[in-house]
Image: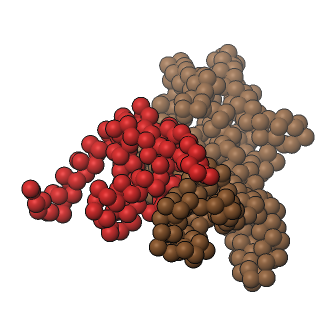
Amino acid sequence: MYSSELIKGTLRTIVLKLLADGNKMYGYEITQRVKELTGNKIQLTEGALYPTLHAMEAEGVLSTHTENVGNRIRKYYGITRSGKKLAGEKLSEYRDFINTMVTLLDLQLKIG
Amino acid sequence: MQALSHEQVAFITSDLQRQGIESEELRLSLLDHICTLVEEELENESDFPVVYSRVLPRFFKKELKEIQTETNLLLTYKHYYAMKRTMMISGALSALTFVLGSFFKIMHWPGAGVMLCLAVLVFCFGFLPILFVLKTKESISSRDKIVLFIATLFGIIVSLASLFKVQHWPGANMLWISALSILVFLFLPIYYLTGIRNPEAKLNTTISSILILVAAGILFMMTNLRSSAWLEFGTDLAEQQIYVTRNALNASTNAVIASVAPERIADAKAIQSDCDQLYNAIEGIKGDLVKRATDDDPKISEQEAIAMNKGNFGLPVSTLFDNEGKESPLLQLLNANLLNLRKTMQEKHGLTNPMLLKVDETTVYDDETKTWNQTHFYHLPFEVVMKNLTQLQIEIRLVELTCIK
C-alpha cells in the first residue's frame, strides 16, 4: 500500500486511463480493477474516489448511465471525447513526471 | 451471492442520509458500492449489522460526511486549488512589493509609487477577496460570514486609504474616515454582540473588541496628526507676512508711479499695465483655487480657505495639472505670459536683475530634475501653492518697481 498523498495526485489519471479504451465501469469495479492490476498495492479509497468521479462528471470528462441491479441503481462511468483528450495529456504529463523524478531522486529503474 | 433485501437497502440509504450524505447522486453511488461490499462479506458472515458496521468505516477517516464535503468542494470549486494558489501568490507578491516599495519610498528612489500601488491593488483586489471567498466556504455560520465580509471591506478601504494618503491623492481622508467608521460602528458592534452570546468565546470576544477599539483609537489619532502647534503658528505667521509684504509692495508701486517724471509717464504706464495684467491673472488662478476649495462659497475668505485646506494636496494638482501630471492650459498660459513679460521688460525696459522670474529654471531635488512648475505647484499642499502664487505676485511688483525706476 502506498500513502494516500501519493495516490491522491494520480487518481484522475488512473480513472481516465482505466476508462480510456471505452470501457464502462462502476465505482466498485474501478477499485477492484486497480487492486487487481497492481497486485493489491494500490487500493483506492472510496472517500477520495467518489468525490473525484462526481467532479469529473460535472466537468464533462466522464459520462454516466445507470442500470438497475437487484433493488438498487448502479452508475456506470464512461469517458467523453474531452476526457479522452485529457487522458492523453495526463498520461504524457505523468510520463514526463516519472522521468523527472527518476533523475531527481536518482532512482535506478529495474528493466525487465 | 446473497442479495440484500429491500429493507436492508432502505436501511443503508437512510443511514447514509443521516450521516450527512445529502446529495442523492452521491448517495446512490455509495449505496451500490456498500451493498456490493456487504454482499461479498455476507458470504462468510451472516450478521448484516456487524458486516455493515465493518464495511462503512472504509469510506472515511473521521466521519462519513467527509465525502459529501469533499464532493461539494470539488463541484463548487473546480478551481479551488487554483484559487488557493492564486491567493498565496498574490499575497506573497503584495507583501514583497509593499516591503520593497516602502523601502524605496524611504530612500527616495524612483519606482516607489508604482510598487506601493501594485502592492495595495493586488492586496485589495486579489488577495483579500479570494481569502474572503475561500474562508466563507469553510465556515458555515452566517455570523462568521457577515463578520468576515465587513472585515474584508475594512481591510480593502483602509489599504486604499493608506495608498491615497501616501500618494497624496484626493479623497484619502474620506476613505480613511469611512474605514474607521466601518470598523467602529459596524464591525465592532456585530462582532461583540454576536460573539458575547457564546459563553466559551465571551472572554476572547471582549478582549479582542477592546483591542480593536484601542487600535481604531490609535488610527484615528494618527488621522489628525499634525506638526506641533508652535511650528504651525510659525508657518501661519510666515504665510500671513507674505501677504503683508505683497500689499505693502502694491502700495509703494502705486506711490512710485505717482511720482514718475512727466516725460517717463507713458513708459511707466506701459510697464504698469503689463504687470497688472499678469498680477491679476495670478489673482484669478488663486480665486479659482479658493472657489474650488470652498465649493464656491463667497462668505469664505481667501485666508479662511487656506486655513481650512491645510495639507490638501489633491486640489492644486487636479486644478493645475492633468491626470498624467502635465501642466493644465491655465498653467501653460501663465508660463507663457511670465516668459513674455520677462522678455519685454528685459528688452524694452532694461530689466537686468537675474533673480526675478526664473520661470524656465529647473531644480534638482533627490536626484530628480524638476521644472519650475513642478517645484512650485506639483504635489504641494494647498497653502504652499497659494503662498507660491502670492510670491509670484511679489516678484511681478518687484519687476515693475525695478523697471519704472
Place residue B264 in its image quadrant.
top right
The letter of the red chain is: A
Residue shown at 87% from the left, 37% from the top: B297
Above or below, comparing residue B268 to residue B36 in the picture: above
Q: Farthest residue to the right: give it.
A: B299
Q: Is B196 on the left or on the right of B231, as rendered?
A: right
Place residue B282 in its image quadrant.
top right
Q: Is B241 on the left or on the right of A27, as rendered?
A: right
Examine the rendering and report whether any part of residue B13 can be seen.
no
Residue shown at 66% from the left, 39% from the top: B316
Number of numbered discs on residues = 0
Q: How is the image coloured?
A: by chain
Residue B182: image location, x then y, percent? 77, 58
Quadrant into which the C terminus of chain B falls: top right
Residue A19: image location, x then y, percent? 38, 42
Residue B379: image location, x then y, percent? 58, 44
Examine the rendering and report whether any part of residue B322 can be seen.
yes
Residue shown at 41% from the left, 31% from the top: A81
Above or below, comparing residue B182 to residue A16 in the picture: below
Q: Is B361 on the left or on the right of B129, as rendered?
A: left
Front-most of residues B318 and B73:
B73
Above or below, comparing residue A13 to residue B91 in the picture: above
Residue shown at 9% from the left, 56% from the top: A111
Residue B218: image location, x then y, percent? 70, 71
Front-most of residues B149 and B67:
B67
Q: Farthest residue to the front: give it.
A: B1
Q: Colour of chain B?
A: brown
